[in-house]
């Protein structure tokens, strides 16, 4: 199992988010809304997807830390169910404006940081406290829905940018 500390986790989240934002800060409104930039999703759709998953993570963690058992546990979800859920997220956010998505992204990211900052380190790091699928500690779910998720979709955005430019593009990671 990979070792992690709360300060290191916070740093990875903050750095990942900063690099991710730098990547799409280069894009204009038309590029952000362009359909089929990433599969059938636009960059805006991708950001909305990240917002929803990060919100679920916050909700899930909050319920777990309060001693509850959330009904939605996407971390144990089969891929085909996750694909259906992602399609639902896409459809529900098609009409949401870019400005609203960007505002929600900032708010949700700040809330995610606050959840990590205010959680006890043992709650986040101890694999026996809140076991995820495979006995993983809570920080695995946090990573999967923050800096790892940013990097996953940063690769998609970079590939799209490279295709638009007709090059292989930068290999900088978020």
Image: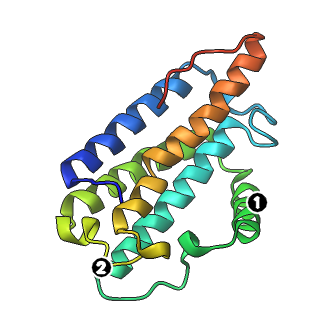
Q: Is residue 58 above or below residue 33?
A: below
Q: Nearer the viewer, residue 88 or 7?
A: 7
Q: Which residue is mark 2?
A: 128
* Residue located at (27% from left, 41% from top): 11
* Residue 93 seen in render: yes
In the image, which disc is placed on residue 87? 1
* Residue located at (68% from left, 45% from top): 45
The quarter of the rendered structure image containing the N terminus is bottom left
The image position of residue 105, as x and y in percent, is: 48, 46
Work out whether mark 2 precedes mark 1 in sequence or the reverse, and give the earlier one. Answer: 1
For label 2, the crowd category at 10 Å Cα-Cα, with few meaning under 14, some 14 to 19 and many 20 or more, is few
Q: Residue furthest bottom?
A: 68
* Residue located at (29% from left, 62% from top): 115
Q: Secondary structure at mark 1?
A: helix
Marks 2 and 1, Cα distance to the nearest angstrom?
33 Å
* Residue located at (30% from left, 53% from top): 113
Left or right: 129, with 94 as reference point: left
Please identify the quarter of the rendering in which residue 141 is found.
bottom left
Please identify the quarter of the rendering in which residue 93 is found.
bottom right
For label 1, the crowd category at 10 Å Cα-Cα, with few meaning under 14, some 14 to 19 and many 20 or more, is some
Left or right: 102, with 153 as reference point: left
Left or right: 115, with 147 as reference point: left
């Amino acid at each position: 199992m990979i070792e992690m500390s709360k300060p290191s986790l916070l740093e990875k989240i903050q750095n990942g988010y900063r690099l991710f934002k730098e990547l799409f800060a280069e894009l204009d409104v038309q590029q952000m809304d362009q359909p089929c930039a990433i599969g059938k999703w636009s960059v805006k759709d991708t950001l909305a997807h990240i917002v929803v998953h990060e919100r679920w993570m916050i909700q899930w963690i909050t319920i777990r830390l309060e001693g509850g058992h959330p009904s939605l546990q996407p971390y144990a979800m089969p891929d085909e169910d996750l694909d259906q859920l992602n399609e639902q997220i896409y459809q529900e956010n098609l009409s949401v404006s870019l400005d609203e998505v960007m505002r929600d992204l900032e708010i949700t990211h700040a809330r995610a940081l606050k959840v990590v900052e205010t959680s006890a380190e043992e709650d986040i790091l101890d694999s026996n406290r809140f076991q995820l699928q495979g006995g993983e500690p809570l920080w695995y779910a946090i990573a999967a829905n923050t800096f790892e998720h940013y990097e996953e979709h940063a690769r998609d955005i970079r590939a799209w940018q490279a295709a638009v430019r007709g090059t292989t593009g930068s290999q900088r990671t978020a």
